Amino acid sequence: MKKTYLILLFALYSIGIFAQSTQPDYTEAIKLVEVWLEAQKDFDKLPGISAAIITDQDMLWSGAYGQLNVEKKVKTKATTICSICSISKLFTSVAIMKLYDEGKLRLDDRIEDLLPAYKLKQKYPESGPITIRSLLTHSSGLPREAAYPYWTSPDFPFPSKAEIDSKLENQETLYPASTYFQYSNLGLTLLGEIVEEITGIPYNEYIENNILNPLNLKDTRTELPEQLYGEELAIGYASIQRNGSREKLKFFQANGITPAAGFSSNVIDLGKFASWQFRLRDTTSTELLKPSTLKYMQNVHWTDPNWKRTWGLGFAVYKGDNGSTWVGHGGSCPGYETTLQLDLKHKKAYSVMINANGTDPSKYVKGMHGIIEKVKKSTKKTPAKTTKILQQYTGYYNLSPWWSEIYISTWNDKLVALSLPSDKPQNSMAFYKHIKGDTFQRLRDDNELGETLTFIRNKSGEIISFERHGNYSKKILK
């Protein structure tokens, strides 16, 4: 009987019944992510920021800080909608590749053979053809924009499809096709027109019925929902001025540029979009696209002659610090900066949305990822008693005048100190091992012990500061 029980126990373990105990516990890492993002929002003077972390099919965490409407003090939430601008290109690319899967176009089809309105001048007679593939990889040689000043005019007058097409004959290529990487909103706009031309269905309608609805992306639209502006749709603000202020920008619609830059969404929906990609890569069944098609899109299809830029079919593709292949896209529109980045090997994704210009959302992706990557798999659980003892030391401490703050939190059976602000929080984390009483020592990278950190209490026994290198930092009451 005992032997049978042991065999059953081993079988259950082998099929994953007890696998949960070997999975990383991200609770303490997420706490640092929250502390870091909230601090960076203040130090970077952002109106609002929302973010999400996805692990395969799960939403590991989502959160938000600041305000979507500064004038009315409406708080930013994880569900807050923003313009995702150029992330729109991923949806257009998926639509094109769906038509490719259905045999309705080929990647090497010439644009002039598919789009009657295409009359743009080829400046280089020796150039190869401008194809679907070269538009997807931004190697077509086309100009970056349609022939209108929609990015810089105060009202952001994005042209209609008819207006874009009417001026194509007045434009010409910048380079021969398949020669250099030249990011082109015009190129992806033309791919949206091709979707309409081939299907006979308006672009917006096709995207909604064939991508957004099947993936249950209820808060993703091919426009900015004006009726929600300032309440659920964030108001956009300009880059920061010397006096620290940000100008409130006017509402806009991308109109004819929609396939390249017109969508809106939130970090939750983009997380679902990321999970679909992880799911499709792991199966043999078609879900919108064939698995092989998505994988093909996320391979490198273009490398610039300087070897510094690589691109897939619609996706930016690059090598991460951990050796994994990353794919995704960023977006920048008047008043909004957004990004969606996927670590394909480790099945983690990060989405960030900021309702202001002049900041890089990928910085926050790298920061969140850097903190999360510090977590190691372990079957050893820190005793609750130990965690409770360590928690009395947690909080913010003043580092003025040399730095702003330091946040101390628990990390397994240790303390972790995070300096704030920090563009690279993973490099600003120091771990401390308990020695005795209120004394800790820093754990070096080689696991040897470094300097001492001693916490100071008042007469009531409350922690009021810490001493390090003979100097004192007071605890900040928040």
Image (tube, rainbow, N blue to C red):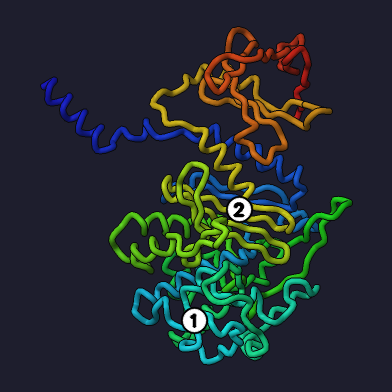
Q: Which residue is mark 1?
A: 129
Q: Position of residue 424 (x, y in %)?
A: 64, 39
Q: Is residue 94 above or below residue 50?
A: below
Mark 1 surroundings: few (<14), some (14-19) or many (≥20) residues within 10 A: some
Disc with the residue nearer the chain's start (2 vs 1): 1
Badge 1 element: loop
Say whether residue 471 is left or right of residue 350: right
Q: Nearer the viewer, mark 2 or mark 1?
A: 1
How far apart are the two marked residues, 2 and 1, measured between alpha carbons? 37 Å
Q: Which residue is mark 2?
A: 352
Quadrant that contains the N terminus: top left
Q: Residue at x 81, y 58 (%)?
A: 71
Residue type at mark 2: give it. Answer: Val
Q: Position of residue 116 (x, y in %)?
A: 52, 92
Q: Residue at x 73, y 72 (%)?
A: 151
Q: Residue at x 56, y 48 (%)?
A: 62
Q: Who is closer to the viewer here, 384 or 379?
A: 379
Residue type at mark 1: give it. Answer: Pro
